[in-house]
Image (spheres, rainbow, N blue to C red):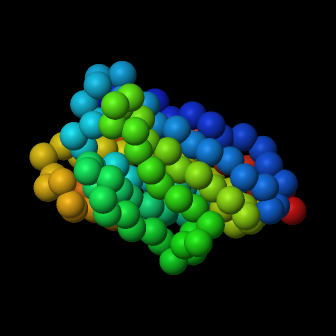
Amino acid sequence: VQLQASGGGLVSAGGSLRLSCADSGHRLNSAAVGWFRQAPGKEREFVAAISWSGRRTSYADSVKGRFTISRDNDNDTAYLQMNSLKPEDTAVYYCAAQLGVSFTIVVNTPTGYNYWGQGTLVTVSS
């Protein structure tokens, strides 16, 4: 698994961005996927997760109703659609993947993932 996160950038409050997480190793289609973020001076925190089947998702309370995680297993890519962005969403966003997880399980802790992308910076201006 070799993850590449992209799609970050500078956006005004209330705007939208879509992050992508592509796996050049072509194994993401059988991996649980999660998105995490880390703001300056803060610990990495859970944002959203999706089972490898795509049937189950999980979200942090802070992003529920605004963010949507999805995946395209045919193309080994996962996405994080972020709407109604707030300045407090500013962070480096990381995607993560874990193989060998049951197809219905979502993983929402950083320690549950063995594979990480390099991160993409999201900056939301007020």
**Residue at point 37%, 63% (across, down):** 57
In which quadrant will I find the N terminus? top left
In the image shown, does 8 or 50 lie closer to the viewer?
50
Q: Residue at 45% across / 50% down in the picture?
A: 70
Residue found at x 44% / y 61%: 48
Q: Quadrant of the C terminus?
A: bottom right
Query: Residue 41: horizontal and vertical position, in percent?
Result: 60, 60
Give coordinates of residue 16: x percent, y percent: 72, 52
In this view, the residue in front, 52 or 101, is 52
Residue 96 position, x and y percent, is 36, 45
Q: Inspect this view and state whether residue 40 appears.
A: no
**Does residue 60 show up?**
yes
Q: Residue furthest bottom?
A: 61
Does residue 105 appear to the left or right of 63 in the view shown?
left
- The part of the image, by quadrant, that contains residue 111 is bottom left
Above or below, 19 relative to 49:
above
Q: Where residue 66 appears, x then y in whole percent?
A: 62, 67
